[in-house]
Amino acid sequence: MKRHVSLDAVKAIRALPIPVILATGNVICFVRAAAKLIGASDTMIGENGGVILVGYDSEPMVLADIGRCRQARDLLMKEFPGLTPLDEAYRKSELAFRRNIDVERAKSLVSEKFSDLEIVDTQFALHLKNKNVNKGTGLKKIASIMGLKPENFAAMGDSENDLPMLETAGVSISVGNAAPEIKGISTYVCREKYGEGAAEGFEWLKRQL
């Protein structure tokens, strides 16, 4: 799969009369850089809701305990010797791994031994995280900080980790390559996929404002 920035999506973001808040499973330092480059808001959600940043130069708010994830990581490493961590030095609330193991078996093992944790598969990586923290709780936190309600927000996504956020927002948009469960709850389903789908979603949203 090619991972590149859609210039059409960037253009659409910059044309919106409302701020665009990036929400991702990636580490917050990456999100900060991406937000600056594409012209998104200086408010952002990283690590699937585990880290919130309000202001490019502010200190990140960490909303989950990574210590529990490290304990589960040690168990997973024994069970799956080929498990490969991603960006571990930069993660503050969760851990991420390459998808080079039996995902369902790993999910079952974590569920059995760590009832407060879960593995979420984004199709790009596996995220070992606290069950009570997700992009939806991240959206609620940001809404509270901004003095708004979650239903005042529109959310766009494509993967399993986007589901809580789309369920929380007042308007939900899914791109064409989104998982069926994401499309099933969406206010608008884009015809186009990936970045081109995001551009379509932003254009649709702009027409609703």
Image: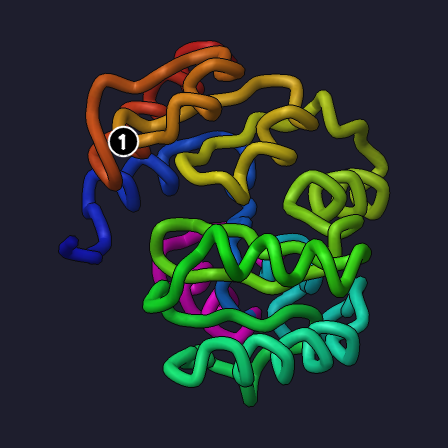
Q: Is residue 125 above or below residue 165?
A: below
In the displayed image of the protein, which residue is found farthest to the left? Answer: 2
Residue 51, image quadrant: bottom right
Does the segment drawn in magenta span residue 51? Answer: no
Of the pair 13 and 160, the residue shown nearer to us: 160
Q: How many marks?
A: 1
Residue at (70% x, 70% y) in the render: 93
Q: In this rendering, would 31 be left or right of 95?
A: left
| Residue 101 visible in this rendered orientation of the protein | yes
Of the pair 138 and 103, the residue shown nearer to us: 103
Of the pair 168 and 204, the residue shown nearer to us: 168
Residue at (55% x, 46% y) in the render: 21
| Residue 45 visible in this rendered orientation of the protein | no
Residue at label 1? 177
In the displayed image of the protein, which residue is found farthest to the bottom? Answer: 89
**How far from the left and from the top, in percent, is residue 3?**
21, 57
Mark 1 residue element: loop
**How far from the left and from the top, in percent, is residue 155?**
54, 31
Q: Is residue 46 above or below residue 153?
A: below
Q: In this rendering, would 73 be left or right of 112?
A: left
Of the pair 57 and 101, the residue shown nearer to us: 101
First to last magenta residue range: 28-43
Callout 1: few (<14), some (14-19), or many (20+) C-alpha neighbours within 10 Å? some
Does the segment drawn in magenta span residue 38? Answer: yes
Q: Which amino acid does the dot numbered 1 rest on?
A: Asn
Residue at (57% x, 70% y) in the render: 28
Q: Is residue 46 above or below residue 58?
A: above
**How far from the left and from the top, in percent, is residue 82?**
37, 82
